[in-house]
Image (spheres, rainbow, N blue to C red):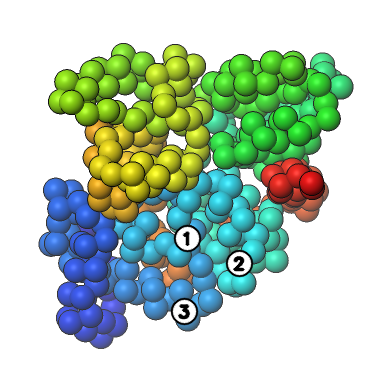
Amino acid sequence: MTPITRPGLVHAGDVEREARRLFERIAQPDRWDLEMCRVIAPMTLEIQALKKQRNAVVLAHSYQTPDIVYGAADFVGDSYGLSLKARDTKADLIVFSSVRFMAETAKIVNPQKKVVIPEPTAGCSLADGVTAAQVRAYRRAHPDAAIVAYVNTSAEVKALSDVCVTSANYLEICRRLPESKIVFLPDRYMGAHLRARLPEKEVIVHDAACVVHEAFRPETAREWRASVEAQGRRLHILAHPECAPNVLAEADFVGSSEAMMEYARKLEADGQADVLPVTECGTADRMRAELPNVRVVGACSECPFMKQTDLRSVLEALRAPRPDQEIRLAPDIARGAKRALDRMFELTRPAAS
């Protein structure tokens, strides 16, 4: 990686201090050694300066690389947490380091802000797995059903849905919907988990899947559990609900990436723990960096879409956003999608007692 620098922008001492801060924060000397941190430090320093100059905020999903998470981001989390940060920010410019549907969500919930995505072609297999035409067909076939759109969908799909959900709140929201029938899209595995946990309702599930979580196999989880147990320790398997049912059956905990982080923090508070996070590699990277008494085992899977974004593209989006990086939505689509997202926020609030 070649650093993008400007003559006289930073002093050598600043670079060295930033490099050591990054090295200590990322906590991965095998992959992000001090020399690599010295390479990226000029970029992270410029990113920090540009954020102040432009009243900008950088939001990064947990699946982003450690240099972005610990060198550029102001807030890191899952889709639900970041949508709240986007909605409530006072910044003039939102740089969303993730994939396109997340940047669209930021624009939908805070339409007066300028929202840019460093890599505008970064898509999502789930968002690409359902179209607006298919939603209209579901509406015709099931007029009495609530159309529930996972946040991993395009703005056009959200605009045609009754409510949006994330991996952090889909069970809670679907329980609270008054309809006895639900069309859940687009994730067939999360939909299957919902159907199993909500037997009192009819759940019709769209057939699409996440390329990352679909790759995991139950045999691998069992092998890692046996390996850790052979050493006299217990393995805690944490799985994302986008995984197949036979993978979820092996898990001690099922939840969003941020819920996994919180679960691992609780394990760490009780003492050293072995954890297998069955999700994208970025969550494992965060656990290694933030939870030193948690032993992260197993092989993760990288999202090819999330990994399109690198530190260079975040910096360039802050320096001078290109027209194709700015999120623009048709007014009718933005209004419809905002209605579905606002209902998500409303149904996620604690019920009145």
Q: Is residue 54 left or right of residue 156?
A: left
Q: Who's the residue at 33% across and 64% down the image?
A: 71
Percent coordinates x, y for residue 85 in the rendering: 58, 59
Q: CA distance from mark 2 to mark 3?
A: 14 Å
Q: Nearer the viewer, mark 3 or mark 1?
A: 1
Amino acid at pointer 2: Thr
Percent coordinates x, y for residue 92 in the rendering: 60, 72
Q: Who's the residue at 67% across and 35% down the image?
A: 172
Q: Is residue 272 left or right of residue 181?
A: left
In the structure shown, which secondary structural element does the residue marked by tag 1 occupy?
strand
Marker disc for residue 89: 2
Q: CA distance from mark 1 to mark 2?
A: 11 Å
Determine the image quadrant of residue 297. Answer: top left
Amino acid at pointer 1: Phe
Percent coordinates x, y for residue 121 in the rendering: 48, 45
Q: Nearer the viewer, mark 2 or mark 3?
A: 2
Residue designated by label 3: 52
Residue 291 shows in the view:
yes
Q: Is residue 21 left or right of residue 260?
A: left
